[in-house]
Amino acid sequence: MNAITSMMSIFQTHGLEFLKATVITVQLTAVSLLIAMAIGLVFAFFKVSNVFILEKLADIYVFLVRGMPLIVQLMFLYYGISSVFVLTDFTAGAIALGIHSGAYIAEIFRGAIQSIDRGQMEAARSLGMPYTLSMRRIILPQAFKRAIPALGNQFIIGLKDSSLVAYIAVTELFNRALSAQAENYMPFETYFVVGIYYLILVLIFTVIFNKIEGRLDTSKRSRRKGGKPFDQGKTVIQSV
Amino acid sequence: MIKVKQLSKAFNGLQVLKNISIEIDQSEVVVLIGASGSGKSTLLRCLNFLELKDSGEIEIKGQAIDVNRTNLNKVREDMGMVFQHFNLFPHMTVLANVIEAPVHIKKKRKQEAIDQAMGILQKVGLVDKAHDYPEQLSGGQKQRVAIARALAMEPAVMLFDEPTSALDPELVGEVLETMKGLAREGMTMVIVTHEMGFAREVADRVIMLADGKIIEEGHPTEFFTHPKEERTRRFLQQVL
Ligand SMILES: Nc1ncnc2c1ncn2[C@@H]1O[C@H](COP(=O)(O)OP(=O)(O)OP(=O)(O)O)[C@@H](O)[C@H]1O
Ligand SMILES: [Mg+2]
């Protein structure tokens, strides 16, 4: 039997099972990224707070997450979380993944917030807007928009990293691949098929993300409305 | 309206303002001039507490401002500020820029804020741009929107920091005209500018700063025709 026909037969026997596992992978990714966004936003605020303790706290968090392999953190957090709380493997896995991605997302948000021209905060404050209102109404909407490409990237990484929770018994896509190849003794073909599942997922995600990005682009918005951006040289100065 | 006594301010060891004292009356138009780095912007920014003084006293509308006790946001509502680089909120339309602070700080009803904003936009000649985004405007239009945004808070004083310095020469006039209109209506204004013709025509008083000190002040006719200080003379020769 050549590789192609084995892959076809793997697809026939496991295709539906893989699809169900893909749904779990998507759910896992979605939940973990929601957690990561919340954590990331909080720690990004810590980092730009100018409050020494908060800044240090955020630094330590980022250092710990960046300094260890994900699989080590995952095992550590999984056993840590499940020894304190009674949680399903799915929930524990999602939280662990979220804590991991959160550090990277915190860095993305911090960079985006700091990239917004200081004049924006000053203009808001000069109108009498308090700090938090200025952040919420003026800085964050612009920072979010600027963070989107990097966030998209991080989401894709999060999607792929979710495969590691296979080792803590969550029956997501990679977990199913592990058991399928143990049954059929065709690891190469099995992983190849599962790889295609991941590729398609990432492809769908990328298309959706590009749509969102396009919609949030103000210059495109004004072009749609028929106006043409005036002297763009000046707006560059303003955004530096 | 504003009383400044013995105001001093340093940035990491560099003494930028040295014992500045000024009194500005209601409806007075004061023009601040001086070489680059003389402390004009810093003085202006101390007046609305975007920079905090090191020592000295600032009294606004008869109230001495204690940074630890007074609500600075309330004080800033009274001190409209216009920046060299406009600092419009790029993610909002012109109208949204103007109603942002009235709606969120003064808690005006939206319709009321819109009606008021349209009135102000009418005054600065930009009603037809209300639904455009800042990037669709010329520099002069942007600066007029910035003025409208500040006016919407119904401030007691307007501070201008080189409002025409970032503009193409042919766009300077429209902004100066708008400012002249405000002066005629009796707005109290403190203006940093290099537009000496404007100062001569509109100012009630011209103040010359050098190395963080007031070295000369006077009525514009007197000030421009018979400057007393050698440094003032040299400076005027350079800019005229
Ligand atoms: N936030 C700051 N941190 C450190 N130094 C500052 C800060 N703001 C201003 N300075 C310094 O204070 C001095 C006065 O600055 P300021 O901006 O008040 O001058 P200016 O008269 O407005 O000059 P210009 O005409 O160039 O705008 C300058 O030497 C400047 O480098
Ligand atoms: Mg300046």
Image (spheres, rainbow, N blue to C red):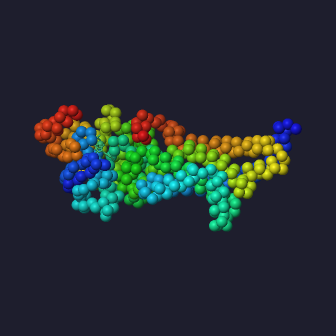
**Which residue is painted at 31% across and 52% down in the image?**
B51
- Relative to B111, does residue A85 appear above or below in the rendering? below
Q: Quadrant of ligand 1?
A: top left
- Relative to A4, does residue A128 appear above or below in the rendering? below
A76 or A51: nearer the eye? A76
**Which residue is painted at 53% across and 55% down in the image?**
A61
Q: Position of residue B62 (x, y in %)?
A: 23, 60
Please state if A14 lies on the left or on the right of B147 as rendered: right
Q: Quadrant of the C terminus of chain A?
A: top left
**Which residue is painted at 66% across and 64% down in the image?**
A82
Question: Which quadrant of the structure image shows residue A84?
Answer: bottom right
Please state if A214 lies on the left or on the right of A178 as rendered: left
Q: Count of labels shown?
A: 0
Q: Quadrant of the N terminus of chain A?
A: top right
Question: Which quadrant of the structure image shows residue B40?
Answer: top left
B134 or A225: nearer the eye? B134
Q: Position of residue A226 (x, y in %)?
A: 50, 37
Q: Position of residue B206 (x, y in %)?
A: 19, 44
**Which residue is painted at 33% across and 59% down in the image?**
B72
Q: Is residue B191 visible to us here?
A: no
A24 or A178: nearer the eye? A178
